[in-house]
Image (cartoon, helix red, strand yellow):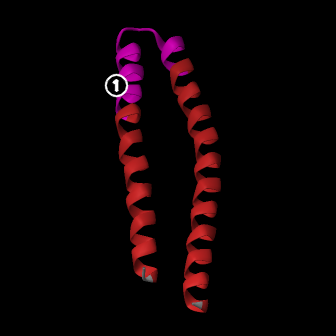
Amino acid sequence: MSESSYYTDFAIKAFRIYLCMMVFACVNKACFIFLQAMGKALKSTILSMVREIVSACTEKDTDRETEQLTEDTLDKIEKEGHE
């Protein structure tokens, strides 16, 4: 496999993860806007804060996964170069 095919595989995985999370982000946003409109600002604020906490935790995990995928890709390219 060429170097560009590894990057393509990585990009496909990254976009799939991103697109899967878009559904949850939209539902969450709709819920907290609805709660505000119903006059339940405290519940809306709590929901929004939970989303931010989950987002921060997920971002750290995603960064680690990205680093691992990058290292794996570079290792594969290096091995192919020695063959």
Magenta region includes residue 35: yes
Image quadrant occupied by the N terminus: bottom left
Look at the image and say whether residue 21 sits in the magenta stretch.
Answer: no
- Residue 68 or 80: which is nearer the viewer? 80
Q: Is residue 69 above or below residue 28?
A: below
Is residue 19 shown above or below 41? Answer: below
Residue appearing at x 63%, y 47% in the figure: 61
- Residue situated furthest front in the rendering: 83
- The residue stretch that appears in magenta: 26-45
The kind of secondary structure the magenta stretch mainly shows is helix
Instruction: State the residue in front, 59 or 43.
Output: 59
Residue 14 locus on image (x, y percent): 44, 56
Above-or-below relation of 14 to 17? below
| Residue found at the far bottom of this picture | 82
Q: Would you say 8 lies left or right of 56 here?
A: left
Residue 65 percent across, percent down from the top left: 60, 54
Q: Position of residue 28 (x, y in %)?
A: 41, 27
Q: Residue at x 40, y 75 (%)?
A: 5
- Left or right of 7: which side holds 80? right
The answer to whether residue 61 is above or below residue 32 is below
Amino acid marked by disc 1? Ala
The residue labelled by disc 1 is 30
Q: Secondary structure at mark 1?
A: helix
Question: For the point 38% across and 60% down, which residue is it?
Answer: 12
Q: Residues within 10 Å of mark 1 (few under 14, many from 20)?
A: few
Q: Nearer the viewer, residue 59 or 70?
A: 70
Q: x%, y% of residue 4? A: 41, 80
